[in-house]
Image: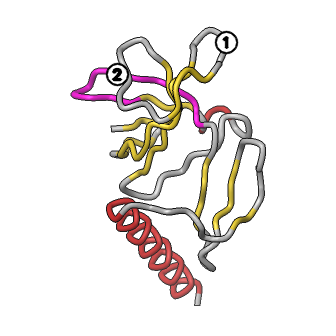
Amino acid sequence: MVDCHTAHIACRFNKLLQLVNKRNGEVMEENPKFIKSGQAAICELVPTKPMCVEAFSRYAPLGRFAVRDMRKTVAVGVIKIVRRKRADGSWIQSGGKADGTVSVADVVVDKRAAKVIHAQQGTETAAASAAAAAHQ
């Protein structure tokens, strides 16, 4: 369960990207198999439902999160980059060096993550059409 601002949403650790040194931020290992207690890492998280977050560099209150297991905090961190899928299938990035850039859908996503993204698009489309119907 990931708690970010007021949201409490289940997320899946999709990839462990880098193991980093907590003192100076140096990359110690690329694509680690696991993380031990007390270590710092850069991970890719995929939420199970739509979630309102922002990169810490853009808006700090929506850029902090805590990972909880059985009501105990097991990890805390900041969001470095947020990637959002647009209606035309392209991706837009918030935060990081490529902030605000749009890229084609060249990201390879595993089957479970693809189902989550597809479900998110369906709920966003349904919410948008419901709002449009209510507006008319």
Magenta portion: prevailing SS class: strand
Residue, disc 1: 24
| Residue 81 percent across, percent down from the top left | 63, 44
Q: The disc labelled 2 sits on which kind of residue?
A: Val
| Residue 49 percent across, percent down from the top left | 39, 57
Q: Which residue does the image show at 51% across and 37% down from the upper left?
A: 17
Disc 1 to disc 2, C-alpha distance: 22 Å
In front of the other: label 1 or label 2? 1
Question: Does residue 13 sit above or below 32 in this rendering?
Answer: below
Question: Does residue 79 sit above or below 66 in this rendering?
Answer: below
Residue, disc 2: 74
- Front residue of 59/136: it is 59
Q: The disc labelled 1 sits on which kind of residue?
A: Asn
Horizontal side, residue 51 vs residue 35: left or right: right
Question: Does residue 14 sit above or below 80 in this rendering?
Answer: below
Pick out the residue farthest to the left.
Answer: 70
Crowding around mark 2 (Cα neighbors within 10 Å: few <14, some 14 to 19, many 20+) is: few
Q: Which residues are magenta?
A: 67-79
- Specify the quadrant of the image occupied by residue 135: bottom right
Q: In the image, which disc is placed on residue 49?
A: none
Q: Is residue 41 magenta?
A: no
| Residue 58 percent across, percent down from the top left | 73, 40
